Amino acid sequence: MNATSNTRIPYIVCDQVTKSFGSHQVLQGVSTSFSKGEVTVIIGASGSGKSTLLRALNRLEPHDGGTITIDGVPVTDHEATLQKQRCEVGMVFQQFNLFGHMTVLDNITLAPRRIHKTPRATANAKALQLLERVGMQDHAHKYPWQLSGGQQQRVAIARALAMEPQVMLFDEPTSALDPEMVQEVLEVMRGLAQSGMTMIVVTHEMGFAREVADRVMFFDQGCIAHEAPPAEFFARPANERIAAFIGRVA
Ligand code: ADP
Ligand code: MG
């Protein structure tokens, strides 16, 4: 969080958000907000609905009750609005999802060229700056298969940033990586947080949560069971389930 500002200005607001798959209610009425410059880490057991919530925020998964607003505008199927909102909300997945037949540079410039109609030269110059930011400037002309998992994930982060999002969502960005590659990705994310980016991060990396998060949210059975600043969250687990969870993943 921007240390100079004490006023929380909610940017994304969830009000009683529900989502079911068949008879299984995966989101049980989630109400919370995410403010500009704030880094939220979401933790919780597998199957508790963390990915579904992130996916609902940019309508990869439509919610079926309650409301989500981004900068005051409801997230719905309205096409023009949704396209604008998806530009504002960048997402990085566990499986990097790079386009395998495109170079790193083309992966990064595709959306700016197609959606923002950015001229190729401008898009390339911007992509090279972003690659430098994620420490990948020497790999612009490689293909994803020539890169390690950690390198691919850093490219995926650069690709999301190329759309100049207002907020970045990360869904277990290091879970698919070999252990020796986890830190290089967390390092990029740490830098992003320091630059003031609004971030919502689902992760099991408790060190990252402690150091970087402004608040930690514990998801349990489709609800936000507890949230607190990390110092408080980890020092005094609010209940047995949280204590047990922290004990398992730490
Ligand atoms: P988490 O990310 O916390 O592990 P998810 O949000 O992925 O949890 O999933 C929550 C629950 O919803 C799980 O029981 C999962 O099996 C179910 N689920 C997720 N996506 C779908 C889907 N597309 N169809 C049916 N069930 C789903
Ligand atoms: Mg998940």
Image (cartoon, rainbow, N blue to C red):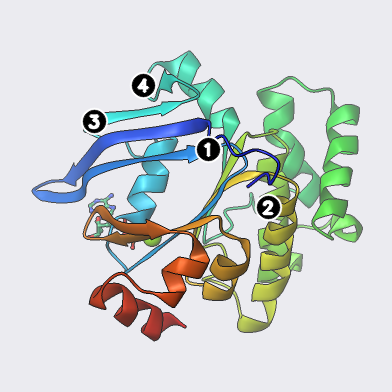
Tell whether label 4 touches label 3 (CB within 8 Å). Answer: no
Q: Is residue 13 above or below residue 97?
A: above
Q: Is residue 177 left or right of residue 224?
A: right
| Location of ligand 2 given as a quarter of the image | bottom left
Q: Which mark is residue 21?
A: none
* Residue type at tag 3: Gly
For residue 180, which quarter of the picture?
bottom right
| Left or right for 32, reference 213 | left
Up/down of 56 relative to 11, above or below: below
Q: Of tags 3 and 4, which is closer to the observer?
A: 3
Between discs 1 and 3, the one toward the N terminus: 1
Name the secondary structure under disc 4.
loop
Mark found first going from the N terminus, 1 or 2: 1
Q: Nearer the viewer, residue 228 or 156?
A: 228
* Along the line of sight, the residue nearer the viewer: 224 or 234: 234
How would you rate the neighbour count of disc 2 (Cα within 10 Å): few for under 14, some for 14-19, many for 20 or more?
Answer: many
Residue 171 image position (x, y, % from top left): 49, 56
Label ID, residue 77: 4
Amino acid type, mark 2: Ala
* Real-space Cα separation, disc 1 to disc 2, in angstroms: 13 Å
Marks 1/3 in contact by CB < 8 Å: the verdict is: no
For mark 3, what is the residue?
66
Determine which residue is flagged by label 1: 35
Which of the two discs, 1 and 2, sits closer to the camera?
A: 1
Marks 1, 3: nearer the viewer: 1
Q: Are marks 1 and 2 in contact (CB under 8 Å)?
A: no
Mark pair 2, 4: CA separation: 30 Å
Q: Nearer the viewer, mark 1 or mark 4?
A: 1
Q: Position of residue 12 (x, y in %)?
A: 46, 33
Q: Which residue is mark 2?
A: 193
Q: Which residue type carries mark 1?
A: Ser
